[in-house]
Amino acid sequence: MEIGYQYLALVVAGLAAVIWGLPAAHRLQKPYDIAAALAVLAGVILTAVGILLTIIPSFFR
């Protein structure tokens, strides 16, 4: 079984976006909280894709 270790950076970046964005979405003022919520959404997507590509590197081929 082949593991794509290079995609772990996606997982780390996604988790960092979620960890930053969740409290920031509640802490920031009105127009900026939307950007933090979008960062959380992007973080969840990055984490999911990173885990998928780490386990199955040739998934999108």
Image (cartoon, rainbow, N blue to C red):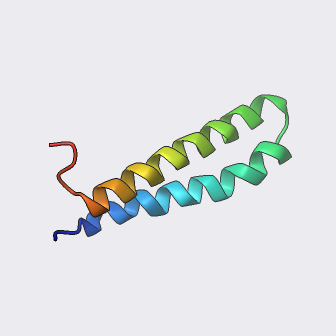
User: Number of numbered discs present?
Assistant: 0
Q: From this viewpoint, which residue is outermost toward the front? A: 1
- In which quadrant of the rendered view does residue 38 lie? top right
Question: Residue at coordinates 16% horizontally, 71% vertically from top-left?
Answer: 1
Front-lying residue, 56 or 35: 56
Residue 48 x/y as whole percent? 44, 51
Question: Residue at coordinates 55% horizontally, 59% vertically from top-left?
Answer: 15
Residue 24 x/y as whole percent? 76, 49
Residue 6 x/y as whole percent? 27, 65
User: Residue 52 vs residue 38: left or right?
Assistant: left
Q: Is residue 23 above or below residue 37?
A: below
Question: Residue at coordinates 24% horizontally, 58% vertically from top-left?
Answer: 56
User: Residue 16 vs residue 28: left or right?
Assistant: left
Q: Quadrant of the C terminus?
A: top left
Q: Is residue 54 above or below residue 21?
A: below
User: Residue 61 vs residue 11: left or right?
Assistant: left
Q: From this viewpoint, which residue is outermost toward the top? A: 31
Residue 46 x/y as whole percent? 45, 49
